[in-house]
Amino acid sequence: MSFTLPDLPYAHDALAAAGMSKETMEYHHDLHHNAYVDNGNKLIAGTKWEGKSVEDIITGTYDAASVAQNGIFNNASQHWNHSQFWEMMGPDSGAMPSELAAAINDSFGSVDEFKSQFSAAGAGQFGSGWCWLVKGKDGGLKVTKTENGVNPLCFGQTALLGCDVWEHSYYIDFRNKRPVYLSNFLDKLVNWENVAARLSAS
Ligand code: MN3
C-alpha cells in the first residue's frame, strides 16, 4: 500500500467564513500535503516499508535523535498528521459534546484552561510543529507540542486534536499572528464531534 492524498471532507472554500481561506486550503492540502504523499512514496519504494501502514511506518522509523534527517519518517508522519487535521476541522464547529467536555474538565479543570494550555503550546513551539490534545497511556488528557512532523503516535498516545503551526498553515490568513490563528482554530474551526469520536474510540 502506498500513500494516497485523501480528499478534503468538505469543499476548499468551506472553512473560509471560519477563518481558513480557499487559498490556504489549495496550498496546504493540494500542494503541501500532496508533496508529503509523493515524496513519501518515492522514499519507501523498494524498502521494507513499502506496503506497510502509515502508522507502522511512523512508529517504526521514529528516532528522536535524527528527526531532521529522517525523510521516510517526516513524510509519513506529515501525511498522517494532515489526514487527521482535515478531519478535525469543519464548517460547523458546534458545541463541544458533553462527554468530551466532561473529560476535559476532569483533566484540566475547565474548557477554558484546556484552550489556554493548547494555545500556549502552539504559540510556544519554536519553529515548525504541531500542538495536540492527547489521551496518554494513563488515560488522562493532556496538551503537548511536537517539532516538525513528530506526532502522538511516536509516544503511544491517542491524538484527539492537533493544530498545524507550520507557517504554511496560517500565513496567508493570519500572516505572523500565530496566537490569533490558534484562538480562531479553537473557537471556530474545530469539529468537536470528531474530537469526541476519537475519545470514545480510544
Ligand atoms: Mn501543514
Image (tube, rainbow, N blue to C red):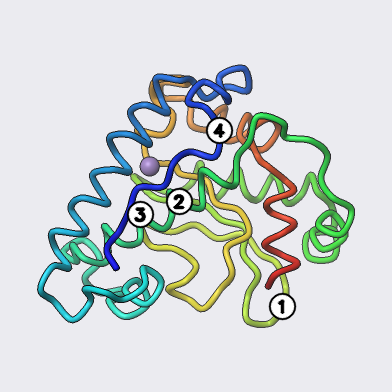
Q: Is mark 3 within 8 Å of ligand 1?
A: no
Callout 3: 10 Å neighbours few (<14), some, many (20+)? many
Q: Are marks 3 and 1 in contact (CB under 8 Å)?
A: no
Furthest residue to the left?
46
Q: Distance between the residues labelled 3 and 4?
A: 18 Å
Nearer the observer, disc 1 or disc 2?
2
The quarter holding residue 52 reads bottom left
Q: Which amino acid does label 4 sit on?
A: Tyr
The image quadrant where one finds ligand 1 is top left
Q: Name the residue under label 2.
A: 83
- Left or right relative to 34: residue 202: right
Give the secondary structure at mark 2.
helix
Picture layout, residue 136 above or below residue 196: below
Give the secondary structure at mark 3.
helix
Q: Distance between the residues labelled 3 and 2?
A: 6 Å
Q: Name the residue under label 4.
A: 10
